[in-house]
Image (cartoon, rainbow, N blue to C red):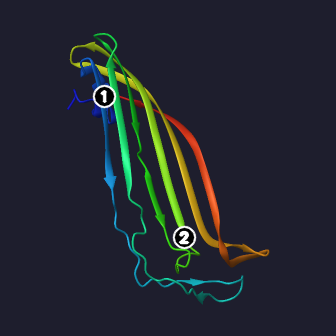
Amino acid sequence: VSDDVSTIFDNPAAMGFIKGTQFYLGGSFVSPHVKMTNAVATHSENIGILPVDVTGDASQSNVVKSAVVPEFYAAMQISPRMHAGISVTVPWGMTSEYDRNSVVRFMTQKTALKSLNITPMLSFSPLKNLSFAAGIQAQYLTMDLSNFDGTVMGVPLAPADQATNLSMDGWGVGYTLG
């Protein structure tokens, strides 16, 4: 619907058909049910030694965490032909976490990915039924990974009793046209 402010997520030119000022705040509750049952894993204790069976928990419920995914849109008519708007969304996000004693702990223990996308935009309507728009997309992404596979006392690929963590984050910039 071209006069609903949330359409600027897909097409920023839809702002050209909004009268006055509109705000939209919403969200979704995501509650996946992921479980692991009867898992089996092997691991190489050192370089050159054959893999051995990993002992530990072979089943787990609620591997993936529930989350609220928010979204916000706003558009304001600056003049009869100009609009300004902003979209704030969370396009990616999920956290999975296995128990410290899980049989898959040498492959994965925790994976967390979260992003935030902020898109300010402007539209111009040269004709009554025609609108053009452009915006800058700035997206922040953070990711945390951990497992129990690391270096123990200088020996590579030895099973570790402490999780190895890798965290990264950063900004990306793009654009949107409509």
Residue marked by disc 1? 23
Residue type at tag 2: Thr
Identity of the residue furthest to the top in this view = 79
| Mark sitting earlier along the chain (1/2) | 1
Residue marked by disc 2? 108
Q: Secondary structure at mark 2?
A: loop
Tell me which residue sits at (30%, 33%) in the image. Answer: 24
Depicted 140 relative to depicted 119: above or below = below
Q: In this image, 140 relative to 71: left or right?
A: right
Q: CA distance from mark 1 to mark 2?
A: 41 Å
Depicted 7 relative to depicted 148: above or below = above
- Measured as percent of width and height from the top left, residue 75 is found at 33, 24
- Measured as percent of width and height from the top left, residue 39 is found at 45, 83
Q: Quadrant of residue 63?
A: bottom left
Number of marks present in the image shown: 2
How dense is the environment of label 1, judged by Cα within 10 Å: few (below 14), some, or many (20 and up)?
some
Tell me which residue sits at (59%, 75%) in the image. Answer: 106
Q: In this image, 153 relative to 3: left or right?
A: right
Identity of the residue furthest to the right in this view = 154
